[in-house]
Amino acid sequence: MRGAANQLLASTPVTQVGVRRALDILFAGAAAAILAPLFLIVALAIWIESGKPIFFSQLRLGQNGRPFRMYKFRKFRPDCDRHGYPLTMEGDGRLTMIGRILAASKLDELPQLWNVLRGDMALVGPRPESLVFFDCFRNGFEKVLDHKPGLFGPCQVMFRHESKFYPADVAAVDFYRQVLFPTKAKIDLAYFPRRTLVSDLGWIVRAAWAIAAGSRAECTLKDLSKAPGQQTGH
């Protein structure tokens, strides 16, 4: 068994691509089946609060710069321009009540399991960028597009609370182009050319832990703020 594992880890890049694709299909299919009740609960909550559509779709940049349609649960009001502001900000007024929960817990990303099954995305890869930021992929950063975008990865963990990073005195889109995008691109370029199956698994575990721990912490803070005898504000 150990010998087979060592052979797998030492396999050629082409073989590892095939193994990753097989694992993507296996794990995304299993996750979709296990989480099917949660899909239904989220879809019903969105429909009850603000009606249709249940899902949000948007063109994103895929591997080698090919655009694909990425799917999410809708977290903004249905009357928002689907081609509007490309970033979700802290306290974004477009968010519905359910949308705020989805954004905090990252449950809005669940439909991207379909993108993984289709082959548009992988379980682990760089975060797919909006077409609005296509011009950022230059001066060496275009090499990020060599890799299939993914649900999980270093930047998805490190920038889980990206909406909190934007300074109040700088336009958010400018800050993203000049600071956040280059930072994330450098992290991706440092990781993905040297990735292994084991390191990919590590980032999946870290992402799952960050989401679970972060959601629990947020729920605890909300419960404390509602506790009797607690004073709020000064």
Image (cartoon, rainbow, N blue to C red):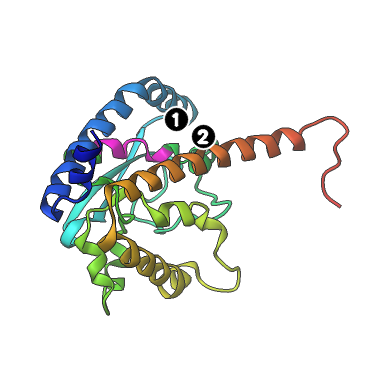
| Image vertical order of residue 105 relative to residue 164, above or below | above
Q: Amino acid at mark 1?
A: Ile
| Residue farthest to the top, as pictured | 37
* Residue 67 locus on image (x, y percent): 19, 55
What residue is pinned by disc 1?
46
Q: Amino acid at mark 2?
A: Ile
| Residue farthest to the left, as pictured | 14
Does residue 109 show up magenta in the picture?
yes
Residue 151 visible in rendering: no
Q: Residue at x 30, y 40 (%)?
A: 112
Disc 1 to disc 2: CB gap under 8 Å: yes
Disc on res. 64: none
| Image vertical order of residue 196 relative to residue 115, above or below | below
Q: Is residue 94 left or right of residue 24?
A: right
Does residue 120 show up magenta in the picture?
no
Q: Rate crowding at label 1 as few (under 14), some (14 to 19) or many (20 or more) other CA atoms within 10 Å.
A: many
Q: Magenta part mainly helix, strand or loop?
A: helix
Mark positioned earlier in the residue sequence (1 or 2): 1
* Residue 27 locus on image (x, y percent): 28, 32
Q: Nearer the viewer, residue 194 or 120?
A: 194
- What whole-number distance in Å separates the C-alpha atoms at marks 1 and 2? 7 Å
Q: Residue at x 38, y 51 (%)?
A: 81
Disc on res. 98: 2
Q: Residue at x 25, y 29 (%)?
A: 29
* Residue 90 locus on image (x, y percent): 56, 54
The magenta segment = 108-114
SS of the residue under disc 2: helix
Residue 213 visible in rendering: yes
